[in-house]
Amino acid sequence: MSKDNCIFCKIAKGEIPSATIYEDSHFRVMMDINPATKGHCLIIPREHFDNIYDLDGETAGKIFSLATCIARALKDALGCEGMNIVQNNGEIAGQTVMHFHLHLIPRYKDDEVKVGWVPHASDEKELEELRRAIKAAI
Ligand code: AMP
Ligand code: ZN
């Protein structure tokens, strides 16, 4: 989706209404319209980035700094027992809106949310090859 037709760009600019809980010159924080749990929020940068590969380090730092503040507010306001921070990149990873965003999902006992994966046994040789390849790419 082009950024001209991006729903989160329109929400960020205020062209489409949203249940906003915080905004500043860089970000809007809003309630997710189809929440996983009570209080599920999204942090969206006003500037369009498709995903984490596009994001610059300064914006990334500001987003996570803001996430600490919103997470504490959710905990204080809702008394949740835990919190998942989720950020999907690419359709295969579950990204449905191609404008970078961070999910804050408060967790409660018996909330039936599934965030996770099946752990696999690792192969020592393969792990070392992967470690080298990734290290070299940094
Ligand atoms: P993702 O699957 O990581 O791309 O997450 C997209 C999220 O955006 C989903 O949790 C949707 O429920 C949420 N969403 C989509 N449209 C809106 C909207 N207009 N206002 C608030 N949340 C939205
Ligand atoms: Zn956008």
Image (cartoon, rainbow, N blue to C red):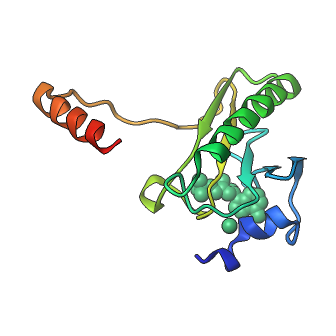
Q: Quadrant of residue 127?
A: top left
Measuring from the top left, give residue 61's x and y in whole percent: 65, 38
For the C terminus, the quadrant is top left
Residue at (61, 77) in percent of width and height = 2
**Camera-nearest residue between 13 and 31:** 13
Q: Which quarter of the rendered image does ligand 2 occupy?
A: bottom right
Residue at (65, 74) in percent of width and height = 3
Residue at (47, 62) in percent of width and height = 91
**Camera-nearest residue between 132 and 9:** 132
Q: In which quarter of the image is residue 5?
A: bottom right
Measuring from the top left, give residue 4's x and y in whole percent: 69, 79
For the N terminus, the quadrant is bottom right
Number of dots carrying numbers: 0
Measuring from the top left, give residue 109's x and y in whole percent: 66, 23
**Left or right for 2, reference 76:** left
Above or below — where is 33 with respect to 87? below
**Left or right for 116, reference 70:** left
Residue at (21, 35) in percent of width and height = 132
Measuring from the top left, give residue 133's x and y in whole percent: 22, 41
**Left or right for 16, reference 111:** right
Above or below — where is 79 with respect to 17? above
